[in-house]
Amino acid sequence: MPDALPTAPSAPDLLSPATSEWLTSDRPLADVLADADPTQLVLAVSVGEGGITAGTAAEAVALLGLDPESVSAAYEPQTEPGALTTIPLVPGERGARSLILVGIGDGSPDDLRQAGAALGRAARGRGHLVASVAWGEDGPAPEPVAAFVEGCALGGYTPPRWSAKDPAAGTAPVATVTLLGVPDPEPVRRAAIRARATMVARSLGVTPSNVKNPAWVAAQARTLGRRTGLKVSVWSDAALRREGFGGLLAVGGGSATPPRLVQLDWEPPGATSSTPRVVLVGKGITFDTGGLDIKPAEGMLAMKTDMSGSAIVLAVLAACRDLGVGVRVTGLLPLAENAVGAASYRPGDVITQYGGRTVEIGNTDAEGRIVLADALAYADEHLDPDILLDIATLTGAARVAFGRSMAPVYATDGGLSDELVAAGERAGETLWPLPLVADYRPLLDSDVADINHIAGSKGGAGSITAALFLREFAGTRRWAHLDIAGTGRSDVDRGLLSKGATGFGARLLLTWLEEMR
C-alpha cells in the first residue's frame, strides 16, 4: 500500500515558518531612527487612554516632525485594542515610510496581544518595524511584553500555499521588529518561540490530506526531532498489529494509507529517573470522512485539520529545548485516516484496544477517542507519567457549548485543572473547567463489550461522556483532557487567527511546561 499519493503537489517547508528577527533596545527613539533605513522603516506608536498628546507617544510623533495635537485632531486615533491609524510619510523628510498609531486599550496583556496582532498584519512584507509601546507604570514586565510579541508574530503569519509556480510557506512577515524601552530580551525570545510553535502546528494542520497521511506526519516528526534534539520512534502498521493497538488499526483500516504511532521524547540535561515526566497525547486523524457513518459534504471540508492535536503536541515537543523545559516530556501521536473502504470498521463492531479492554463501536464518526484510547493505555502501561494529558478536536458538543473562543478542560484533580486554566490565561488561550460527572458513566455501559465508546442519544452531554470514556484508559494517573473542537479551527482570518487550524493549546502547554521543575 502506498505511503504517499501520486497526485500530491510539492510543498513548502512547513516546519520552518517565516519569522521576524526580534530586537530590543533601551536607546532613545531618535538614535534608533537615525540608524535605520527610512525607506524600510515603519514606526508604530501605542495609543492608550491618554491619547497621543502626552508622554512617549507625543515624543515619538514629534520626532517625525509632526505636531501631536494636529495629528490627534486630524486622524482621531482610537484606543480600542488593535485599532490602527496609518499615516503615510515621505521617508526622506520624516525618517520613516509610515507612522502607525495602534490602540492598546488599558494596556493589559490581552489588549497588548490584540494590538500586536494588528501591527503584525499591517507590517507583513515590510523591512523594519520599530514599536514604541507604553508598557504602563510597572514598565516592560515580562507578561505584557510577551503578549505583544506573541500577537505581533501570529498576526504576521500567513498559511502556506501549494502553487505550481512557487510553493511557499506564506507571505513573509516584517523582517525585523525592534521593541523600544525593553532592556531584557529574554521574554521576547521566549514569546517568539511559543508563537513559532503555534505557527508550526497551524501549518501542519492546514496541509491538504492528499499530502498529509499518517506516514507523512511521521516523517515530519522525524525531521523535526532531528532538528530539535528529540528521540523519535515510529510504529508501522505491522508493529501496531503485533503489539495490539486495535483502536488505531480499526480506525485506519479503511484507508489506503495505514496508521502510525509516533513517540517523541525530550529529556533536559541532567535528567534522571526521578525527574518528573509529562506525557502529551494528540489526536492525529489526518482526514475524517466519518467512516461508514459518513459526514455530510459540508462537514468534511475542514477535516484536514482533524490532526491538530498531534500537530500541537509535535510543535510543543520541538520547542522544549529552546525554552529549556526542565521536566521530561513525551509526545504520542496516534495517526490514522478515517476513510471509507472494504476494510472500514463498522457500527456495532467490538474492537480490542491496547491493553485488552474491549469497546463496542456506536458510531464510526467518533473515531478520535478510539485512537486516543490506544495511546493513553500505552502511556499508562509503559511510560509511568506523573501527568498524562490529551488534546483533541474531539466533539461537536464542545464547539456548540463554547463556540470558537474557549475550550473545556477536564481533569482528575482540581489542582491540575487550575494549573492549566492559569497557563491559558497567561497565554491568551482560555480554558473552562468542566466536571467528570459520575452519574453519566453508566451511559457508556455496553451489553456486548467492556464499554461503549459513545453515549448515543441516551443522555446528551457529548463532550463530558467523551472525556469519561478517555478517563477509562488513563489508569490512576493525574490526567487532563482538552477538547479543542471549537477553538482548534477558525472560520475567519482576523486578529491573531488565520483561517483553518489555529494551533490553540501550543502556547498554553508550553507556558505550563516552562513553569514545571
Image (cartoon, rainbow, N blue to C red):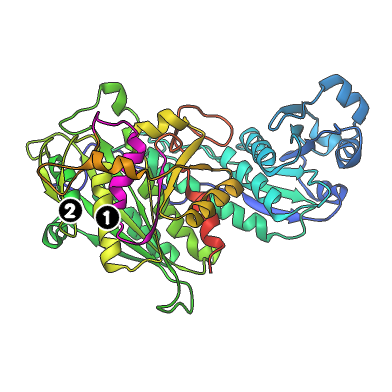
Task: Provide the residue designation for mark 2.
Answer: 353
The answer to whether the residue labelled 1 contacts the one labelled 2, judged by CB atoms less than 8 Å apart, is yes
Horizontal side of residue 65 vs 401, given as left or right: right
Answer with the quarter of the image where residue 435 lies. top left
Drawn side of residue 416 relative to residue 384, left or right:
right
Magenta segment includes 32: no
Point out which mark residue 473 bears: 1
Badge 2 amino acid: Gln
Does residue 61 appear anywhere in the picture?
yes
Seen as rendered, the residue at the extreme top is: 74
The amino acid type found where label 1 is placed reads Phe
Q: Is residue 210 visible?
A: no
Q: Looking at the image, which residue is at 38% across and 45% down? A: 436
**In the image: residue 147, left or right of residue 394:** right
The percent position of residue 10, horizontal first and vertical second, equals 33, 41
Query: What's the distance in space between the residues labelled 1 and 2, CA to CA?
Result: 9 Å
Residue 120 horizontal/vertical position (percent): 63, 38
Kind of element beneath mark 1: loop
Question: Magenta span covers which residues?
Answer: 456-484
Mark 1 vs mark 2: in front: 1
Front residue of 69/303: it is 303
Q: Nearer the viewer, residue 16 or 400?
A: 400
